[in-house]
Image (cartoon, coloured by chain):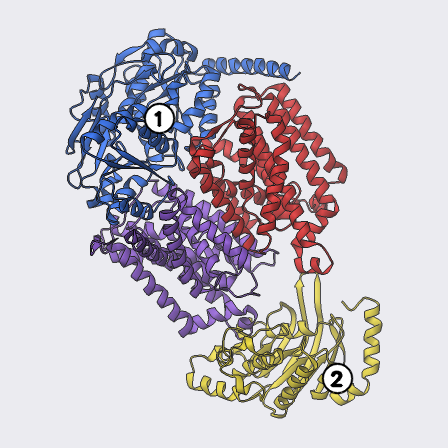
């Protein structure tokens, strides 16, 4: 794809959001699409962090959850409007992500997934146990952006947020930061030798992707209107990882493809019960991991040899 | 109040022995292959189901359940290595370590879902070898099964120490852990010894789960708890260090019990995480790990 | 602008729904009257309380089978639209919306966890569809006075109040409430702390723990060391069995009063063993209970179908279904809005007595049926079931 | 005991389209020391790895005495008598020198009496590690560690010893130490040695025969003394190639 196409994609999403809201969708389909935006923001930003910068953090869902609970706190205790939280929480979570990075990035390689895993685990215990603050598993209710069950505004907002994500992604990948991130991913020692400020680049990647996760969490809170600790589980993290990996880790549109595939499967198999959904989704993800190691995008582009170079970021 | 203190300390130590047994295989495999195995907990879970099957359904004696658990755990670990991990670590892809984490993570989610589907979510219990509550001088209270489990755990870890420091298999493992290149040039077949390490890892996890089963319960998601504990132990002790694993297991057991009793009962699982984070920050290689490893 | 979009879409939505309805009516059984759909939203998988979800599903399936076998409601067949809430509030709320908008459910039944129910109430209110609670104990469910929400079953503050006389009569001076960190556990603990103020010489300590825990030995050591007279365990997960087993293991000598009907679940004795002897459990069920003809039909059919006795919450669920049936018969319609209007006035024979709703606006007794008795029963030997358990006390 | 090695048309490629060795021929006489020199990227180390079986051989033949070995895997080649001492540190740092030596006889570990004899023999071989047999190998100096690796490589009674830049990264004092011992090893005339070395002068001083590689192919070869004579010309030739950027 050319650079121009990359810049058209955000417009496409904004237009789709507007169009769909005008057509009017069945609530179930609208639900599916709106929550898919949440997953797209998460899988997409995780892809930037893991696929492009090579930093496999397992705290990403934790950051989104922090964004969601932060939104609830601002709305309920602070009396702010939901719209304000959509601006404030990404910034706040970026700082949180930066802090986490300062701490977690002191370790390298496979220890990073482990320490972020520990942070997420500890946060999950806190959310459930500190029920006097978080309301525990009773769930924390907050007013939605739009009272009632009208989804059209959320479809528009979802389209805009998805578009925004792709704009940020284009800016990151095509810019200097993206090059430095990939240099670190491919060989940290060589990148270091070339004078790349490794720690600064990593922190920047952590903060930007954390901001996107925070935005996702805030969007989720404003849409769903009720939060519970179950939002932060290893299963959810696995879900996001599966999306990125199935689509193609380190590919610009990998997470998008992954979200489409997994959410569709989920939509069609959910009638069988949650266990079946999980078996099917994790089974497919596992097969992709084992046999199409670079994800669906890489596999498809190999079938179309002429396009290979264009699909690769 | 000293009574509570002594009781807690003892409980923590007994619990810690089992944590160490759960974790020791994870550490062994990491040392040899640099693979962090997120499916380790499911080796334990499936092992304990095998024990339930043998003892409950077939009606065989309890000790056969322990053997069944070890065998089942070993078999699944072996299959995991051959089918999931070997293709990755023999490939030429970059960031293999991280990729094995993703693969085993998804495998673990799949095994939990599959087990839920096959076995249902009811809690099952395994009878123990010594199903009796003991009141020692009416001061210390313990179940016999806890003592059996601890003694067995320590015996198994002692056996592992013997294997590692006194046999050729152990020499090969240590060689692979200390210098994979050196091991290759002296002609040690990494595949063969990785398989053996996985067999041991699965057997120990399965056995640990079967020893824990009479104290707790058997159900599909039980592996998650086992994995988290094993992780914490391995990180604290230092990846690849068996001595460290034993020490860290006991430490985790004591810290969990003590903090639960003396700080707040609602945060039991958080204490382990906190300990793990602290160790990673101040001594990333773990208490017994060595600096400059290829981690 | 935005409002306009909303209007358009809602109109479009209505149009499409009507079209779908016509299509359904046209293609389906053209001669028979249209089927009635009831939504069942329950925890059918982890991390929800899937054990209870399973029991709920069995009860619902049986009810639909019996009703359809007897010719349906007013000649119309009943079908269930089953959704899994996974014990998660957000999943429960969206499942409920699916049941309403996609399956066109006339009423939603089978809700279990209070947390989920509280989120679903907003959906019920928004769509004006009846939501039937039976064993979700949070006071808020009826105290919020939503016209669409009904409960045939107990609630926390009443249960807690009934427990105080029991504690006094047994002479307990020091009571520990062991509560899981959920709406169920902590909600009860709070209500009990409030209610026990009526008995100033009883001291209460609440010990909170992680609901999904697998190891309570440390917690139980602490409880045992404080040497209470009684421990009230309030949890639905494995911790019911764990607290008993591990409590005795670490030398807990106090009486254990544990959650409701859990000791009757099939895995109780096989997991707890000897330690279960002496456990007292409060319940709303007892052989001395006056089971009506309706109740007897239910119990017999249930035993025939599944080979064991139903637990008391399944009785209430049965009454939930019958309440919806009564409302449909009374109003002659399965329109959700009609049912919301009709339900407060229905009376019918329930499983353990006549059922009618108290409609005291502004209180917890709004759309609430509460004619249940509370029994305290003691398990005296391994394997004791509901019939063998000794009745220690009754609170009405 | 030891054998001559004959290499014919050896090709090595890590990825299908990038060939590092493009047909190399070589002959190392039994019990001689053959040095391989050449510019950076000439494929010297790759040649040793190809012979040791740790780099993928895509064509050509390797004869060790009467045996064809190019189809064997690395472990099987150890069994066939090939011993490789790689350039990177390969010592087992947490084990004692003796334990390191014991692992050198891995492929015949069941033969206990033979193994003990070999450990004793090889432990005695180099003056500068003899006093340290009970110490942890990781605590020795870099040069001593390299000697431990060479001694370990000799425990299995190899027919062919492959030394890949044994002095890379060592201080001049240690370089001299290692070469003193390599010279002693050569004098004992007990093993065929292929030696890859950047320190051309050290290599020429100790070698019997020298091969020069360039760009994955044979450049020239001859007896050590002869190559030493025309070294200036050879090196000038490399420089011009490296300057043109074609060597790598």
> Is the residue marked by circle 1 packed among few (<14), some (14-19), or many (20+) residues within 10 Å?
many
Quarter occupied by the N terminus of chain C = top right
State the count of labels.
Answer: 2
Q: Numbered disc 1: what chain?
A: C
Which image quadrant is residue C88 in? top left
Q: Label 1, secondary structure: give it.
A: loop
Q: Please name the residue that numbered disc 2 is placed on.
A: D201
Asked if residue B241 shows in the view, the reply is yes
In the figure, the shade used to draw chain A is red
In purple, which chain? B
> Is the residue marked by circle 2 packed among few (<14), some (14-19), or many (20+) residues within 10 Å?
few
- Image position of B57 (left or right of C344): left
Q: Please name the residue that numbered disc 1 is placed on.
A: C136
Q: What is the CA distance from the residue labelled 1 to the residue labelled 2?
A: 88 Å
Which image quadrant is residue C200 in? top left
Q: Position of residue D60 (x, y in %)?
A: 66, 73
Which image quadrant is residue D248 in? bottom right
Q: Position of residue A135 (x, y in %)?
A: 45, 32
Q: Where is residue D90 in the image (x, y as percent from the top left)?
A: 58, 73
- Image position of C345 (left or right of B243): left
In blue, which chain? C
In the figure, the shade used to draw chain D is yellow
């Amino acid at each position: 794809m050319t650079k121009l196409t990359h810049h058209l994609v955000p417009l496409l999403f904004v237009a789709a959001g507007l169009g769909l809201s005008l057509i009017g969708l069945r609530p179930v389909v609208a639900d599916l699409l709106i929550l898919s935006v949440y997953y797209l923001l998460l899988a997409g930003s995780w892809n930037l962090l893991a696929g492009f910068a090579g930093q496999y953090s397992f705290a990403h869902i934790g950051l989104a959850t922090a964004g969601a609970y932060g939104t609830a706190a601002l709305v309920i205790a602070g009396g702010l409007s939901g719209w304000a939280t959509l601006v404030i929480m990404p910034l706040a979570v970026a700082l949180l992500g930066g802090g986490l990075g300062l701490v977690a990035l002191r370790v390298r390689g496979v220890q990073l997934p482990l320490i972020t895993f520990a942070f997420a685990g500890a946060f999950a215990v806190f959310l459930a146990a500190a029920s006097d603050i978080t309301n525990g598993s009773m769930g924390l209710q907050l007013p939605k952006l739009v009272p009632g069950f009208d989804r059209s505004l959320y479809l528009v907002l979802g389209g805009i947020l998805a578009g925004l994500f792709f704009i940020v992604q284009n800016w990151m990948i095509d810019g200097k930061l993206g090059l430095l991130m990939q240099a670190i991913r491919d060989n940290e020692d060589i990148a270091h030798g070339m004078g790349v400020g490794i720690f600064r680049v990593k922190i920047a990647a952590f903060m930007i992707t954390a901001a996107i996760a925070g935005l996702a969490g805030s969007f989720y809170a404003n849409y769903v209107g009720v939060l519970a600790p179950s939002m932060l589980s290893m299963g959810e993290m696995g879900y996001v990882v599966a999306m990125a990996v199935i689509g193609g880790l380190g590919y610009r549109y990998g997470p998008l493809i992954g979200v489409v595939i997994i959410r569709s499967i989920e939509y069609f198999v959910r009638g069988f019960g949650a266990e079946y959904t999980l078996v099917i989704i994790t089974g497919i993800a596992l097969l992709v991991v084992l046999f199409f190691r670079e994800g669906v995008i890489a596999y498809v582009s190999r079938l179309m040899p002429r396009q290979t170079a264009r699909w690769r970021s | 109040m000293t009574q509570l203190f002594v009781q807690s300390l003892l409980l923590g130590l007994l619990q810690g022995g089992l944590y160490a047994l759960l974790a020791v295989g994870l550490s062994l495999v990491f040392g040899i292959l640099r693979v962090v195995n997120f499916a380790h907990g499911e080796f334990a879970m499936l092992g304990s189901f095998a024990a339930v099957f043998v003892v409950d359904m077939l009606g065989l004696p309890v000790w056969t359940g322990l053997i069944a658990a070890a065998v089942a755990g070993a078999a699944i670990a072996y299959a995991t290595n051959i089918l999931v991990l070997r293709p990755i670590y023999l490939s030429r892809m970059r960031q293999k370590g991280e990729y094995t984490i993703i693969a085993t993570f998804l495998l673990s989610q799949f095994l939990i879902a599959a087990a839920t589907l096959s076995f249902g979510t009811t809690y099952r219990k395994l009878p123990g070898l010594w199903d009796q509550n003991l009141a020692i001088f009416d001061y210390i209270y313990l179940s016999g099964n806890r003592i059996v489990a601890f003694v067995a755990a320590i015996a198994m870890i002692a056996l592992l120490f013997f294997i590692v420091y006194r046999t050729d298999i152990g020499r090969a493992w240590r060689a692979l852990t200390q210098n994979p290149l050196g091991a290759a040039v002296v002609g040690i077949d990494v595949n063969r010894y990785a398989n053996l390490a996985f067999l041991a890892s699965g057997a120990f996890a399965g056995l640990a789960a079967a020893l824990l089963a009479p104290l707790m319960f058997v159900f599909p998601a039980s592996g998650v708890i086992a994995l988290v504990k094993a992780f914490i132990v391995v990180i604290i002790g230092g990846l690849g260090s068996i001595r460290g694993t034993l020490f860290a297991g006991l430490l985790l057991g004591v810290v969990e019990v003590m903090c639960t009793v003396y700080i707040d009962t609602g945060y039991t699982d958080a204490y382990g995480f906190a300990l793990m984070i602290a160790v990673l920050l101040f001594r990333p290689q773990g208490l017994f790990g060595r600096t400059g490893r290829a981690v | 602008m935005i409002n306009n979009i909303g209007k358009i879409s809602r109109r479009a939505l209505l149009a499409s729904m009507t079209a779908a309805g016509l299509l359904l009516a046209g293609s389906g059984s053209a001669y028979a009257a249209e089927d009635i759909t009831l939504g069942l939203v329950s925890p059918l998988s982890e991390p929800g309380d899937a054990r209870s979800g399973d029991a709920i599903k069995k009860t619902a399936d049986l009810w639909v089978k019996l009703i359809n076998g007897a010719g349906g409601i007013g000649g119309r067949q009943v079908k269930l639209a089953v959704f899994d809430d996974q014990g998660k509030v957000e999943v429960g709320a969206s499942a409920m919306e699916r049941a309403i908008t996609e399956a066109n459910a006339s009423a939603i039944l089978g809700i279990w966890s209070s947390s989920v129910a509280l989120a679903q109430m907003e959906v019920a209110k928004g769509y004006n569809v009846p939501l039937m609670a039976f064993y979700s104990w949070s006071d808020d469910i009826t105290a919020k006075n939503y016209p669409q929400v009904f409960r045939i079953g107990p609630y926390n503050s009443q249960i807690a109040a009934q427990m105080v006389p029991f504690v006094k009569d047994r002479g307990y001076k020091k009571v520990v409430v062991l509560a899981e960190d959920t709406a169920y556990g902590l909600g009860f603990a709070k209500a009990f702390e409030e209610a026990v103020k009526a008995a100033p010489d009883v001291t209460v300590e609440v010990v909170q723990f992680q609901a999904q825990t697998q190891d309570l030995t440390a917690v139980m050591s602490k409880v045992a060391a404080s040497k209470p007279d009684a421990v009230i365990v309030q949890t639905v997960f494995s911790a019911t069995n764990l607290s008993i087993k591990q409590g005795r293991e670490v030398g807990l000598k106090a009486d254990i009063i544990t959650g409701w009907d859990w000791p009757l679940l099939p895995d109780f004795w096989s997991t707890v063993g000897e330690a279960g002897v002496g456990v007292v459990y409060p319940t709303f069920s007892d052989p001395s209970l006056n089971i009506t003809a309706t109740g007897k039909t239910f119990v017999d059919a249930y035993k025939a179908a599944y080979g064991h006795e139903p637990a008391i919450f399944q009785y209430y669920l049965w009454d939930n279904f019958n309440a919806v049936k009564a409302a449909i018969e009374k109003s002659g319609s399965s329109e959700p809005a009609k049912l919301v209007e009709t339900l407060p006035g229905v009376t019918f024979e329930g499983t353990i007595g006549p059922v009618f709703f108290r409609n005291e606006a502004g209180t917890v007794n709004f759309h609430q049926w509460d004619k249940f008795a509370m029994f305290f029963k003691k398990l005296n030997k391994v394997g004791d079931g509901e019939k063998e358990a000794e009745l220690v006390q009754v609170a009405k | 005991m030891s054998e001559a090695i004959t290499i014919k048309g050896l090709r090595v490629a890590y990825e299908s389209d990038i060939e590092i060795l493009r047909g190399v021929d070589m002959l190392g006489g039994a019990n001689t020391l053959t040095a391989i020199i050449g510019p950076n990227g000439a494929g010297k180390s790759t040649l040793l790895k190809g012979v040791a079986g740790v780099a993928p051989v895509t064509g050509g033949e390797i004869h060790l005495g009467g045996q064809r070995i190019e189809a064997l895997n690395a472990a099987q080649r150890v069994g066939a008598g090939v011993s490789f001492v790689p350039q990177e540190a390969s010592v087992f740092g947490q084990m004692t020198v003796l334990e390191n030596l014991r692992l050198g006889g891995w492929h015949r570990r069941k033969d206990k009496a033979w193994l003990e004899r070999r450990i004793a023999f090889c432990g005695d071989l180099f003056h500068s590690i003899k006093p340290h047999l009970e110490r942890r190998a990781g605590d020795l100096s870099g040069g001593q560690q390299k000697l431990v690796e060479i001694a370990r490589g000799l425990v299995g009674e190899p027919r062919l010893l492959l030394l890949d830049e044994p002095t890379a990264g060592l201080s001049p004092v240690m370089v001299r130490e290692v070469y003193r011992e390599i010279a002693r090893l050569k004098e004992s005339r007990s093993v065929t040695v292929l030696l890859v070395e950047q320190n051309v002068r050290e290599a020429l001083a100790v070698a019997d025969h020298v091969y020069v590689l360039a760009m994955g192919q044979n450049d020239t070869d001859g007896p050590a003394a002869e190559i030493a004579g025309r070294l200036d010309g050879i090196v000038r030739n490399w420089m011009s190639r490296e300057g043109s950027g074609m060597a790598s």
